[in-house]
Structures are given as C-alpha cells and as structure tokens.
Image (cartoon, grey):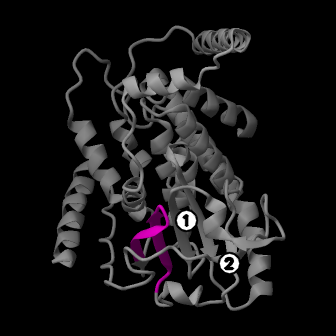
C-alpha cells in the first residue's frame, strides 16, 4: 500500500513537470520498514560521545545530558555520505529555529575506527559548520547497546520528551524529502505556540520590578527601536522606487527543484490568478539563474518566504554561506540564484532577507 501511494505521488508530480516543460523527477525509493532504536515509552539512556570540535572540543561526555532540554532528539549516523548529508543538515538546522521553544538535538556518528572517524569529523564539521557539531560515539559501530540500533540503517532518529522516548525511526534510504517528516516528529515534542495574551503575560512577568532597572530597560529598547528604524529606512533607500511586483516566477520553477512537493507547489502557484499585477518577464530576460543543487533550492525556499522570521532567515542564510564554501561551483550558483530573486524586488522575501542576499552577492560576485 505504501509503495502504491509513493508511485501515485510520483505520477502526479511527473504530470506537473511535463506541463511545466521540465524533466520529471524519479519516483522515491520504497522505504523498507525497519526497526532501529529504543521502543517508545522507554527511558532515554545516556550516550557517551567525544567532541572533535565546538565548545566541548577534546572532551568525553553524555550527549543526552548535554542537550539539557525537555524535548530532545538524537540522530545516529550509520553512514556519513552525500546521500545522508541533506537530512543531517536539515536536522541540525532545526535547533536554531525551534530552540527558543525548548528543543535541542545532536548528531552522533557511529564508527569502529575512532582515529579515522575523528579525522573525518574534523573535515566534515569544518565544512558543514553546524551550530552544534557532529560528535563521535564512544560505543563503536553498534552505538550504545541499550539503544538497539540497526546497522542496516543509514540514519536512526530518536526523539524524547522529559526523559522518555517518544519515537525511533530507522532510515535505509533518505534525502532532503524526509526533512518535513523529521520536523513534524520533533514539533510533536513541543508545546503549542503561545497566544498573544500569553506572550504579553510572560513579558510582563519578566520585567524588572525596580523603578531604575525598568527605566534602563525602557531606554535600551527605545535605542534598539531607533536603530531598527534607521536600518529599515536605509534598506528602503537602497531599493529605491519600483513598479508593481511581478507574480511568482513561473519560468523559475527550478527555484523549487529538489523535492517532489516543491514541483507540485510550483505548479499550483503558477496556476493562481493574480489580477492587477504586471506579468512576469518572458523566460530568459531575468538575470541570474535558479539553483540546480537540491540543498541550495531547499534553503532558498525558506529564505524567500514573505512570512519568514528573522531567526529563520539568518539560520538559513548561514547554511547557504556554509554550502557555498564547499566549492566554487556552489558559490557561483548561490550568487546567481540571489541575483535572480533580487531582480523581482519586494515580491520575494522580507526586507532582512533581501538585505542578506544583496550582501552575499556584493561579497561573492566576481
């Protein structure tokens, strides 16, 4: 049944791709149901690791205790390769976005050769530049015995809340298309977002009670508000006066390549009616180029959202910068995709996102 649904989804995406004039993506491989990790409801036991880099560089410690939050997740890496790298990046990026809501996650590499693994992690962590570097398990290729990890997997995700395992998922074949599922499994650990009234009450409770301290806080907030207003005015001045924003880039469906859902989303958005807006320029007139690298495509989709928060924009831009450093070709591709997005003005991204994109282009365009 699962395989049938995957094939139907691929067929629908293929029809969309044909209508848009692009090559259909191959169907997703069938995931074999495989058990890996502790059972739901069991205690979350310690995981002894060694840090090759980061704040705990050179130390051996318990990764579970180091996370120090009620909602925690461990991603055990059985196979560190080009196939698993996109999901590893997506998993690691969630901490910067969901951390304020009480979540923390850690990537743990499994290996039977500690010396070789430490050398490899030095290169990998230096390349990926994750906020929380990948650490090395001290329990060899099998990992902690009590976790019952399956060596047939490429990755194993273990989520937990209040010290109790909520979910264990073994991946035998994975890619960036699994990122939404991983995000959903982690968000189920977190409390719902507070209402405006709850936020107001929390802020009021956090305010200082002493008059002088409250006065100083008000002064600091007023200065910060002035700074932000000045920064916004400078950004508007740089942008200058412009005409009506074009509709979504119908010819730029490659901007969403890299996931099958992205192809369907591009088709739906291109079909929407947008009255009173100047049509997009014919294909070939806009400068730059949409990305072909799936990881850059995924990150760009997050950056150009009109409702993206400042934390999300900065986190995704940081990942793009790290990705662009991996090769000259990726750097050029990142520059080209930002040039293409900036061509459409206010229609894509927030003020901050466009400012970050302009800064990247200015620093890296050659």
Tell me which segment is drawn in magenta. Answer: 153-169
Does the magenta portion include 73? no
Determine the residue positioned at 57% across, 81% down.
79
Q: Quadrant of residue 126?
A: bottom right
Disc 1, SS: helix
**Residue 336 pos. (x, y %):** 58, 41
Q: Taking 210 as reference, is 256 left or right?
A: left
**Residue 116 pos. (x, y %):** 77, 85
**Residue 267 pos. (x, y %):** 25, 45
Mark 2 Cα-neighbour bin, 10 Å: few <14, some 14–19, many ≥20: some
Determine the residue positioned at 20% across, 58% down.
15
Residue 245 in sight from this viewpoint: yes
Q: Disc 1 marks which residue?
A: 88
Q: Quadrant of residue 249?
A: top left
* Disc 1 to disc 2, C-alpha distance: 20 Å
Viewer-side residue, 306 vs 343 = 306
**Residue 66 pos. (x, y %):** 67, 63
Mark 1 vs 2, N-terminal side: 2
Q: As displayed, is residue 109 above or below residue 215?
A: below
Q: As displayed, is residue 148 above or below residue 184?
A: below
Viewer-side residue, 6 vs 180 = 180
Does the magenta portion include 157? yes
Q: Quadrant of residue 236?
A: top right
Q: Disc 2 marks which residue?
A: 48
């Amino acid at each position: 049944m699962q395989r049938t649904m995957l094939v139907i989804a691929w067929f629908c995406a293929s029809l969309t791709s044909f209508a848009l004039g692009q090559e259909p993506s191959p169907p997703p491989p069938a995931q074999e149901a495989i058990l890996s990790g502790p059972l739901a409801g069991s205690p979350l036991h310690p995981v002894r690791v060694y840090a090759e880099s980061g704040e705990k560089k050179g130390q051996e410690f318990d990764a579970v205790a180091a996370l120090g939050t009620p909602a925690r997740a461990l991603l055990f890496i059985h196979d560190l390769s080009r196939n698993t790298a996109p999901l590893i990046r997506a998993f690691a990026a969630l901490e910067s976005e969901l951390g304020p809501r009480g979540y923390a996650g850690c990537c743990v590499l499994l290996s039977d050769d500690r010396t070789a693994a430490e050398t490899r992690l030095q290169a990998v962590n230096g390349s990926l530049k994750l906020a929380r570097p990948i650490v090395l398990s001290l329990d060899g290729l099998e990992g902690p015995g009590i976790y019952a990890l399956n060596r047939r997997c490429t990755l194993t995700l273990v989520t937990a809340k209040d010290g109790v395992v909520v979910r264990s998922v073994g991946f035998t074949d994975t890619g960036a298309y699994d990122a939404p599922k991983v995000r959903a499994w982690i968000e189920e650990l977190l409390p719902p977002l507070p209402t405006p009234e709850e936020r107001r009450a929390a802020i009021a409770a956090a305010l200082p009670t002493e008059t002088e301290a409250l006065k100083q806080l008000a002064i600091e907030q007023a200065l910060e508000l002035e700074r932000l207003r000045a920064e916004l005015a400078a950004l508007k001045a740089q942008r200058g006066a412009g005409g009506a924003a074009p509709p979504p880039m119908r010819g730029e469906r490659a901007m969403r390549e890299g996931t099958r859902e992205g192809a369907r989303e591009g088709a739906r958005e291109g079909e929407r009616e947008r009255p009173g807006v100047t049509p997009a320029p014919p294909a070939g007139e806009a400068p730059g180029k949409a990305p072909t690298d799936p990881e850059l495509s995924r990150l760009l989709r997050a950056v150009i959202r009109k409702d993206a928060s400042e934390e999300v924009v900065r986190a995704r831009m940081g990942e793009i910068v790290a990705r662009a450093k991996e090769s000259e070709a990726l750097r050029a591709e990142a520059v080209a995709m930002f040039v293409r997005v900036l061509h459409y003005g206010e229609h894509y991204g927030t003020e901050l996102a466009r400012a970050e994109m302009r800064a990247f282009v200015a620093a890296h365009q050659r």
